[in-house]
Each structure stands twice: as structure tokens, then as C-alpha cells.
Amino acid sequence: MEDRFNTIAGWTLGAGIVALGLASISGHYFRADKENRPNPMGHEIEGVVQEGAVADATPFEAYLAKADMAKGEATFKKCAACHTVAQGGANGIGPNLYGVLGEGIGQGRGGYAFSSGLSGKGGKWDWTSMNSWLTSPSAFAAGTKMSFAGITDPQERANVMVYVNAQGSNLPLPAVPAAKEGAAPEVAAVIGDAAKGQKSFAKCAACHTVNPGGANGIGPNLAGVYGEPIGKGRGGYAFSEVLAGKGGNWDDATLDAWLTAPSAFAAGTKMSFAGLADAQERANVIAYLKTAK
């Protein structure tokens, strides 16, 4: 009887010791490192630079200089639910954006009913104002109808702006500011090499001549094309309707946009060439065309 009692007492004591040990271990686990807050804590807040982070000092003009119009067209799909961008396109939830750069902010657009915050903003849509708008519409114009939060990546904004600019506006790209003495080097504007451009032009020679007085072929002769009206002249060449109605002149900005993606620059163009993805190669070809007079 006494042995049985001792056995039961032993088991009870052992169970108590095990329970006490488990409680101690679990307590240490749940307290482990809880005095220190996680890093980073929660979610990043858009537009807020975290402690210790370095703000991007790159001028926006540098992003525009290396903008990719094809990527901008792809990004514009985010906007297509509310906006059209084709010439003569209808207003929807948002206004049609054909030729919007260079126009008054919150004005015109076929009678679109802009919010008072935007229509009273003043000024024109230029590279600076459009960059601010796309960064945060609600910060640019309090009370705007635009529910889109904005685009935080400056390169993505630049890509979209260059694409929209090619849709009837064709404003020249702003110059990249010179770096201050002692400052870190910024992205430089691309300088074309005419000799290399002449070699790249071999890709174009199946459709275009470039010698003065040369005949039109599948595409028009391009001698002296720099500075001339877009989709006009060229010895009576039959341009597509959309290119003939584009407006503006062939300059660095329009030629760069055209050579990046002809179909994005002028939807429905006869030009089947996909474009030149490399910004340096485009600059080289443009430099060569400037010499072809």
C-alpha cells in the first residue's frame, strides 16, 4: 500500500516539474527579442523617406532623357480604363489626352467637367507640372476627381510622359541640368555619333534613300527631313493619314519618339519597322539624318 502511494506521489511530482519547465521555456520564447521593434515596422508609406534612406537627387530631366516610349505605352494601360489618347477620342471617366502637353491645365478637352481644384490651378501642362500630377494627383490638386494614387517610380513617370507627348504634343525634351561642381555625376543627355548612325541606317536602306534627290521607295526619301513638317512633302509620298495629320516638325524629340516605336508614335502607320530600343543608337541615327541634306 505504502509502495503504491510512493509511486503515485513520484509521478505527480515528475509531472509538476515537466509543466514548470515547459512554462519557463515558452515564456522565454514569447519574450525573445520583443523589446526591439521590427525593422522595418509595418508597411512603407508612399512618399515618405525612411530614416537613414537617401533621397534621389537625380533631376527629372535625366529620366526623360533615357525614357522608353514602348514601356510608357505599356504603363499607359493603367490609364486606359479612364482615358483615351487617340486623336478625336472620346472623353470617358477622364478626358481624352491627345495633344494634352502644352495645353492649359484643367481646360478645354472637349468640354470635360474638370474639378474646381484642377480647373483653377492655372498654368500649362509641361514636363514639370505633369511630373507633379503623375506623382500624386491628390497632392497636385486637392479635391481632384482623379482617384489614381500616382506613380512613385520617376523612370516610369518619364516613360509615360514621353509616350503621351508623342500623341499629338511633341514638346521638345528639356535639357538635363549640368551637375554642380563636386556633385556626383548624373545621367547625361545622349549625344549622337553621325558616323555610327550611318552604319545603323543600313537597317533603313531597304525602304529609304537618303541622298539628295533620291527616289521614294517603300518609304520616303529622307534627305533634309530634319526640321521639316511631319508626314508632309517628300516628293508627294503617300503618308498614312495618321502621320500626315500628326502635326509638328521632325526634331530631336519627335524623331527619337518615332524611332523608338513608330506604331506608338502614329497608330496605323505604314512603317512596319518595330523601332530601335537603344537610346544611343537612335541618337546616332538622328545625328546622321541631320547631316543628310
Image (cartoon, helix red, strand yellow):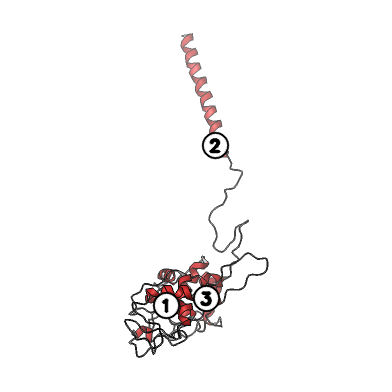
Q: Residue flagged by tag 2: what amino acid is it?
A: Tyr
Residue 126 screen position, x and y as percent: 53, 79
Residues marked 1 and 2 touching at CB (< 8 Å): no
Q: From where the camera sits, is residue 136 visible?
A: no
Mark number displayed over residue 258: 1
Q: Residue flagged by tag 3: what amino acid is it?
A: Met
Q: From where the camera sits, is residue 207 visible?
A: yes
**Mark 1–mark 2 distance (CA, rounded to whole Å):** 63 Å
Lower position in the chain sequence, tag 3 or tag 1 = 3
Q: Nearer the viewer, residue 57 or 216?
A: 216
**Residue denoted by label 3:** 130
Q: Nearer the viewer, residue 144 or 13?
A: 144
Helix, strand or loop at label 1? It is helix
Q: Nearer the viewer, residue 238 or 29?
A: 238
Lower position in the chain sequence, tag 3 or tag 2 = 2
Helix, strand or loop at label 3? It is helix
